[in-house]
Image (cartoon, rainbow, N blue to C red):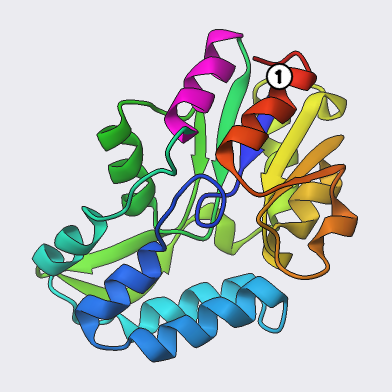
Amino acid sequence: MLVAFNFDGSLAESDAYALLAEEAGVAGDVASLTEQSRTGDLALVDSIRRRVDYLEGLPELEMKEALDRVALDPGAADLISALQANDHHVAIITAAPRQAVDVALTDAGVSADSVVAPMLDIDQNALTGDVSGRILDATKGELLEEIAVENEIPVDETIAVGSDDNDREMLETATDSVCFNPTSGMEQHCENTVTSMERLHEQFEQRNLV
């Protein structure tokens, strides 16, 4: 089974862009763009590029200090480990910076089998305001399908966990789906809705995945 997670709002208890924006002194501007992406008022790719543009010039050291505060939700690491112990492929498909995902997973002592996330570009020890990555070229639904094909997993053996409008195509593409603390109206795109990591774990138990 392929299990695909969003990161911010699902696996992580902190918002990487918010932490970076605080360091850069642009918290309000970035928060507005994040919210517009969550509600579907701004396309995901546009939101990523515009948020990263605000971070131009942030020293790499300050970036690392901000991302050191990114952490997984309590219980998320145990859930990932339990899924992998049962031979399921765990993927993270997210707008959150790849650097943030890597830090949080490493600190929690776990890893994902696949990660698709934008990479913040760095030059001369500072963020350039540019970003790269496959997520800029495809929807989350398309990326879920790509990961399934690459790992020879039938698309009808996929489950997605997300929370925002920018997760909608991933949730609809997967055969099964769970909304985690969803924004308004997202429940209709999921088989089940939960508001805690404990309840999410229970959903996987009910499906005999852990």
Residue 18 screen position, x and y as percent: 37, 72
Q: Residues within 10 Å of mark 1 (few under 14, many from 20)?
A: few
Label 1 SS: helix
Q: Nearer the viewer, residue 134 or 176?
A: 176
Residue 105 screen position, x and y as percent: 35, 36
Q: Which residue is mark 1?
A: 205
Span highlighted in magenta in the image: 76-86
Name the residue: 20% across, 77% down. 23
- Specify the quadrant that holds the C terminus: top right
Give the residue type that dot 1 points to. Glu
Residue 86 screen position, x and y as percent: 61, 9
Name the residue: 63% across, 17% down. 88
Queried whether the magenta region covers residue 200, the answer comes back as: no
Placement of 145 over or under 151, stated as above or below: below
Name the residue: 47% across, 30% down. 112
Name the residue: 41% across, 63% down. 15
Q: Main secondary structure of the magenta part?
A: helix
